């Protein structure tokens, strides 16, 4: 890839990112109410993303060999419990990630 191609690629990526970030403000100005479908997506997508993260996390868990899925089970229970208690998705995901890393690195020492 030449230098000019690299500059053009970066410029296209930047333009696409800016368009997706600021496009919503152009389409839905602050004084105008968003359509019901967009409001529905705003309510439904965070839960859908959380569900996808759970499926992605546990999809390759081996329950018939050590550690028998115990770190994943503990982490999912802590994440769900924390989310039901605090209703903060960032806190739930961050705490779940930290707990999982501590469990597999220090407690269960999962072999690679």
Image: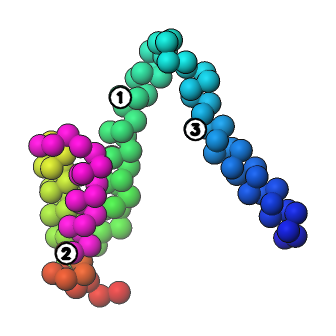
Does the magenta portion include 100?
yes
Q: Which mark is residue 21?
A: 3
Label 1 environment density (alpha carbons within 10 Å; few <14, some 14–19, many ≥20): few
- On the image, the x and y values in percent for residue 64 come to 22, 75
Can residue 69 be seen here? no
Range drawn in magenta: 85-102
What whole-number distance in Å separates the C-alpha atoms at marks 2 and 1? 32 Å
Q: Which quarter of the figure is the C terminus placed in?
A: bottom left
For marks 2 and 1, the one nearer the N-term is: 1
Colouring convention used in this rendered image of the protein: rainbow
Image point (15%, 50%), residue name: 82
Q: Which residue is mark 1?
A: 43
Do the residues under discs 3 and 2 have CB atoms within 8 angstroms?
Answer: no
- On the image, the x and y values in percent for residue 19 come to 66, 37
Q: Which residue is mark 2?
A: 103
Pick out the residue farthest to the front.
31
């Amino acid at each position: 890839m030449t230098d000019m191609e690299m500059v053009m690629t970066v410029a296209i990526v930047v333009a696409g990112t800016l368009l997706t970030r600021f496009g919503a403000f152009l389409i839905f100005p602050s004084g105008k109410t968003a359509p019901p479908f967009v409001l529905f997506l705003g309510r439904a997508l965070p839960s859908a993303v959380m569900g996808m993260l759970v499926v992605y996390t546990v999809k390759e868990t081996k329950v018939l060999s050590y550690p028998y899925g115990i770190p994943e089970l503990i982490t999912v229970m802590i994440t769900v419990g924390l989310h039901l208690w605090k209703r903060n998705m960032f806190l739930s995901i961050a705490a779940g990630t930290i707990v999982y890393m501590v469990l597999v690195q220090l407690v269960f020492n999962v072999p690679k």
